[in-house]
Amino acid sequence: MRTVAEKLLNLERQVTAEKGPFSLFALFLREDAQDKWDLVVSAGWLEKNKEEGLSYLADSLRSILPSDDLVSLSKIVVVDQDDPALAAVHRALKAEHSVVEVKNCTFFGLEIKHAFIITSQRQAETVGREAL
């Protein structure tokens, strides 16, 4: 799954350039998920129009991942920027356009067997850097 995470790193960079920054972009394998990964994302631009944003992300995934990799993804989960659990993820892990691998942790009240964190940072941090 690491190779999929690296492909998603490139996608995350491309989408950030086109749409704006993510505060979270990660792959989570839940303890109970039977080898199906969730793409967990959070971004201000996604909250403005979730349906359009999800469609854009799904199309982007289909354009870069072969079907063998696509079937390993269960769903795209959009997390609201003001979700307190998102702040906990940011405190636990900071990453920006990289692939940080973690195992056996709890995020959003779920047992996560394996995760690849590509970006995890408070939106205010991202906006502040772009303004400089």
Image (tube, rainbow, N blue to C red):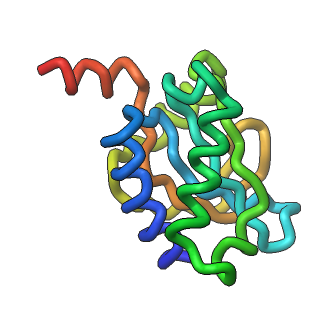
| 43 vs 83, nearest the viewer | 43
Could you say where residue 77 lies in the image, as x and y percent from the top left?
Answer: 71, 43
Q: Residue furthest left?
A: 132
Q: Quadrant of residue 122?
A: top left
Q: Quadrant of the C terminus?
A: top left
| 96 vs 43, nearest the viewer | 43
Whether residue 27 sits left or right of residue 34 in the image: it is left
Picture residue at 61% right of the left edge, 65% below the top: 62
Whether residue 69 sits left or right of residue 128 in the image: it is right
Could you say where residue 109 lies in the image, as x and y percent from the top left?
Answer: 78, 38
Q: Quadrant of the N terminus?
A: bottom right
Relative to 20, say whether 114 is above or below.
below
Q: Residue furthest bottom?
A: 68
Could you say where residue 16 lies in the image, as x and y percent from the top left?
Answer: 37, 41
Could you say where residue 30 lies in the image, as x and y percent from the top left?
Answer: 77, 58
Picture residue at 42% right of the left edge, 69% below the top: 6
Relative to 113, say whether 24 is above or below.
above
Relative to 34, say whether 66 is above or below.
below
Picture residue at 66% right of the left edge, 31% below the top: 79
Picture residue at 60% right of the left edge, 36% below the top: 53
| 104 vs 45, nearest the viewer | 45
| 119 vs 20, nearest the viewer | 20
